[in-house]
Image (cartoon, helix red, strand yellow):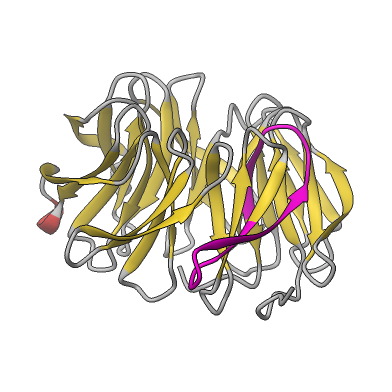
Amino acid sequence: MPNNGLVHPIFVLNSLDASVSVIDPATWTETKRIPTGKEPHHLYLTPDEKSLIVANALGDSLTFLDPKTAEVQRTVRGILDPYQLRFSPDMKWLITAANRLNHVDIYRWDGKDVTLSKRISTGKTPSHLWVDSSSSTVYSTMQDSDELVAIDLASQTVKWRVKTGSLPADVYGSPDDKTLFIGMTGGEGVEVYDVSGGKEAKLIKTIPTGKGAHAFRGAGDKRHIYVSNRVANSISKIDMQTLTAVAQLPGPTGPDCMDVSADGKLILLSSRWAKKMTVIDTETRKVLRQVNVGKSPHGVWTLDHAPR
């Protein structure tokens, strides 16, 4: 099976095994399993691309891995409930969502270390984060209070909050910062909000995708995004300009987070209920193979990814 230019390790978080599976794209096999803190859920590359940060939610820690060699670099402790994380584009801030503790933390990033700047009480169960391209606003979904919250990065205060549909999960912003897409895990589609000019979000459309719309990943062309439909066991391709779903792909057994190969031809998907990473061909829309990993695989990442 072709590896489509994938030469660096693929990382899959095993949330219920407190580990990371390292997959060799040349052989499509797991080469090792790295212990982490309890319940790793999401991961993110440092701005200098020298470290891949694993957020260990119940372990209250961050594990830094070398994205090229899969070696553990260090562990940072005392980070309360880092369920989801994201850097601001200006590289000044690392933001974490404390899913079980109902707050968003803003850490100052100096290129190596994190220092807590502000802890912001939000709503029930902050889930996923997005930061606009100007590094001025953080958007966070509130999974159990069905809200979208906007945080001003300059003042580090809540700007506004609006109600959403049921169980809002991942959030993705268009390249022009005018539109937000939110997966409705308790519904059957993606809600689209107008946030142009920094104004309070206004719902403009719901795009039908499938039951349990959950996690996004850019297709690499700055126009299309993929969303996993966890209950429907499918993946939808969304056109951010026409606000329509333009393709449906298979997403076996509880599809969750995913990554896309640099050429845009492969989706690397965590099949959460099957203990597997699924490889999907975006052109033929067929499953190419599955790789065994640990329990409840969640985050997926490779250095050889499509442009975000």
> How far from the left and from the top, in percent, is residue 267?
56, 62
Would you say the magenta stretch is mainly helix, strand or loop? strand
> How far from the left and from the top, in percent, is residue 67?
74, 64
Q: Say which quadrant the N terminus sits in.
A: bottom right
> How far from the left and from the top, in percent, is residue 96?
50, 39
The residue sitting at 49% across, 26% down in the picture is 99
The image shows residue 72, relative to residue 51, as above or below, that is above
The image shows residue 144, relative to residue 229, as above or below, that is above
Dividing the picture into quadrants, the one containing residue 68 is bottom right
Q: In terms of depth relative to the viewer, which is nearer, 295 or 61? A: 295
The image shows residue 152, relative to residue 82, as above or below, that is below
> How far from the left and from the top, in percent, is residue 181?
27, 49
Give the tally of numbered discs.
0
**Residue 43 shows in the view:** no
State the extent of the magenta-drawn residues as a range. Answer: 279-300
Q: Residue furthest right?
A: 32
The residue sitting at 17% across, 60% down in the picture is 178
Please give left or right for residue 274 compared with residue 226 in the image. right
Please give left or right for residue 268 compared with residue 247 in the image. right
The residue sitting at 52% across, 39% down in the picture is 84
Q: In terms of depth relative to the viewer, which is nearer, 303 or 242? A: 242
**Residue 12 shows in the view:** yes
Q: In terms of depth relative to the viewer, which is nearer, 208 or 7? A: 208
Dividing the picture into quadrants, the one containing residue 183 is top left
Residue 291 part of the magenta-drawn span: yes
Dividing the picture into quadrants, the one containing residue 27 is bottom right
Q: Say which quadrant the C terminus sits in.
A: bottom left
Please give left or right for residue 251 compared with residue 38 in the image. left
The image shows residue 36, relative to residue 138, as above or below, that is above
Residue 270 part of the magenta-drawn span: no
Q: In terms of depth relative to the viewer, which is nearer, 272 or 178? A: 272
